[in-house]
Amino acid sequence: MKNRGDLSIKVFYLDKAVDPNIRMAVYSERLIRKKISFSDYDIVHTNGLRPDLVAFMNRKKIRYHISTVHNFVFEDLAFSYNRFISCFFGKIWLVIWNRADKLICVSRTMKSYYSKWFSPAKLGVIYNGIEETDNSLSPDIDVIRSINDFHSQGLKVLGSVGILTKRKGIDHVMYLVAADNRLAFVIIGEGKELQNLINLSERLNITNRCLFCGFRNNAVKYVRYFDLFIMPSKSEGFGLALIEAVQQKVPVICSDIEVFKELFNSAEVSYFKLEDLTSLSEALKIAIETGSVKADLAYVRYLNNYTASLMAGEYYKLYKNV
C-alpha cells in the first residue's frame, strides 16, 4: 500500500520491546499519547484491544476510526482465560467497538457473528493476506535434523504452528499420534498449554515421536519440511497459519469450523469433526491419498483470495471511500 501515491501512512505501536526481525516499509514509532495529535490524520485504523482502547479514549480527536476485528471475542477470551473474563472484557470490547465508525471483519463468518450487536452498515469484510515466503531463509538445523530422523524411521511427519492455548486443539492430534505409531508430530510455538501438552505426551508414551520446538522466528520456513500440516483449532478468527501452509503447497488437515470451511472447500483441504478421533483418522488417510492434488488446488485459491496485494487493494478502496 505504501506504493499508492495518494496515501501517507504512519504506523504507531504500543510496546517498548519490538521484534528485531520486523522491518517496516513505512514510517513507524512508539505511540506516546501526549506527543500524538490524532486530529492530524484523516483515518485512524486500529488492530487489537489496546489500540482500540487508545482510539476510544481519544475518539473526539479522531475524524474517522476503523478497527479490524480479528477474533470471536467471547469464545477467544473464554479459551484464553475463563468465562468470567470473557463475559466482562467481551462486553467492554463491544462498547469500545461501538464508537468506531467501521468494523472490518476478517471473514464473512465473523461478520455474521457480530451482526447480533452491530448494524450491517458498520460491518465490512476484508480477508487477511500474506506475502510470498522468502524460502531462502534458513531454518534451525536442530529442527530439520529431528524431522529427518523421523523420516528415516519411516514416520509421516505432522506439523502445526501457533500459540499453544486450549483453543488450538493440539491435544486432539496427540491422541491421534498415540493411536497410530506411523506418525510423528512437530509443534512449533509456545503458550500457556505447552507444559500440559508435554505432560500429555508423556502420559500417552509418545515423547519419542513428538518434537516441541518452542517459539521460532519465521516459523513458516519449517512448514515445507512437514508431510502434512494440521490445524485442529476449536475457534479461529481467520487462520493465517493455514494460509501459510497452503502457500507452501503442503497438504492440510483442519477442523471443520465455519471459518475454515469459508476459506477452503473439501477439494482443497481435508476436514475432520472436532472431538472425533475416528473422523480425524479418516481425514489423515484422505490427506495422504490426495495430498498433492488438494495442495495444488488450495494454492490457486490462495493466489486468488489471500495475498498481501489483494488485502492492500481492499483496504485502499475502503480508505478512499471513507
Image: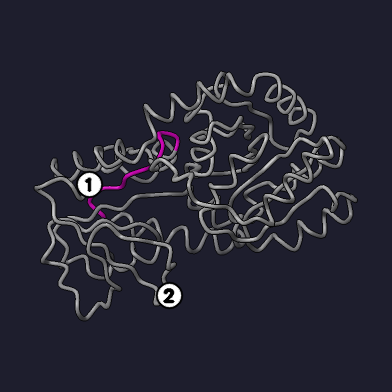
User: Which quadrant holds residue 250?
Assistant: top right
Magenta stretch contains residue 102: yes
**Secondary structure state at the residue bearing disc 2:** loop
Instruction: Tell me whether circle 1 and circle 2 mark residues in contact (CB < 8 Å).
Output: no
Q: Which amino acid, mark 1?
A: Met
Q: Which amino acid, mark 2?
A: Ala
| Of the image marks 1 and 2, the number of the one nearer the N terminus | 1
Magenta stretch contains residue 257: no
Mark 1: few, some, or many residues within 10 Å (few <14, many ≥20)? some
Image coords of residue 309 (percent x, y): 29, 38
Q: In the visual, does 119 lie left or right of 61?
A: right
Image coords of residue 197 (percent x, y): 76, 56
The C terminus sits in image quarter: top left
Query: At 35% across and 57% down in the image, what residue appears?
Result: 47
Q: In the visual, does 293 lie left or right of 273?
A: left
**Secondary structure state at the residue bearing disc 1:** loop
Q: Which residues are magenta?
A: 100-109
Q: Is residue 166 above or below residue 52?
A: above
Can you identify the residue that label 2 sits on? 17
Query: At 51% across and 42% down in the image, what residue appears?
Result: 239
Can you identify the residue that label 1 sits on? 1
User: Which quadrant holds residue 302?
Assistant: top left
Mark 2: few, some, or many residues within 10 Å (few <14, many ≥20)? few
Judging depth in this view, the residue of 246 and 68 nearest the camera is: 246
